[in-house]
Image: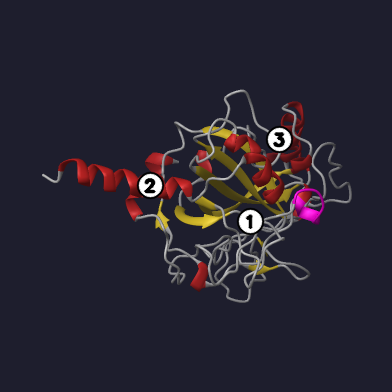
Amino acid sequence: MCGRTCCTVFTGIIIGAAITIAVTYPVLRDEWFGPGDDETGARAAFVACSDAGTQSPADVSEGALASGASILPTNAILRNVSLMTLANVHYHSPAEHRSQGEFSTPNASESGFACDDASDATGTARVVATNGDDVSDARYAFSFCQDVAVGDTIELHWVYSTGAARTGVSDGLSGAFATQNNPYVVVRAQVFKITNNPSDDVADLFVSWNTTLVSDAVRYVGSTTGDKYDNVDRCSPFLVIWHVDRECHRVSARSLDEMCRVMKDNGLSDDLKAHAARQLVPSSLTASALSLSSTFY
């Protein structure tokens, strides 16, 4: 019975949450993937990590500690992307997120993680390594995807937005802000090890993550990613709601290349190349992950 006052307060809360990810789209496009990646063109925007909201990529393992405080309440974390529009598809190599026993093997020369195999020191990893004829002397020659090879681990990202144009995808995040300056943005992430085995074909990778593969997914509030950020004074100021599949899957090289072919046919060019991984963020900058119900896969 608080009438207009409660309505005003509630509306303010919702608007405040939405404004957190508001930015004019040309700036954000350069900030996430584009000229800002090599510090040319439009300058990337950063925030000191001591002042930042919860960040990504996170350790999404079961039981992983997270002490960062999300600015969104639990019931406000978007779960359903069916009414949102796909704005972009891109991928990272190696995986940015970490999931114990699935993709938790540290990359030897850079940030990120590889899918685990039988050599995992914990002895708990599921075997997903490329063995036998998966990796042969006649390694797959990619025609469209760039900077990837058989045996690599990749993390695919599908970017959804309430403010995307329904006319198609575009490089970077600009398309997510085509019709709104303050949309909600959800990124779905699925990790694969690339094989040379036709039995690992995955259809329609451009369209969305493969729901038949998903049996254990989580959602959490984080940020944009990319190796331009660190965990000290160059954190991301941009809020993203993440849906992450916690299992590593196998994908044939030809399926991935077909995805890149469709990306190119849809006008993408910058995102045909694998992006580098951001360093895993500490628990102090990580929001707790919640289970994503299979209803919303």
Residue ID for mark 1: 225
Q: What stretch is highlighted in magenta?
A: 36-42
Seen at 62% across and 70% down, the residue is: 231
Seen at 64% across and 70% down, the residue is: 233
Tell me the SS state at disc 1. loop
Bin the neighbour count of mark 1 within 10 Å (Cα to Cα): few under 14, some 14-19, many 20 and up. Answer: many
C-alpha span from label 2 to label 3: 27 Å
User: From the viewer's perspective, is 38 left or right of 194?
Assistant: right
C-alpha span from label 1 to label 2: 24 Å
Image mark for residue 259? 3
Q: In front here: 201 or 67?
A: 67
The amino acid type of the residue labelled 2 equals Ser
Locate the N terminus and report the quarter of the image it occupies.
top left
Residue 108, x across and y down, in percent: 76, 71
Residue 266 belongs to magenta span: no
The amino acid type of the residue labelled 3 equals Met
C-alpha span from label 1 to label 3: 22 Å
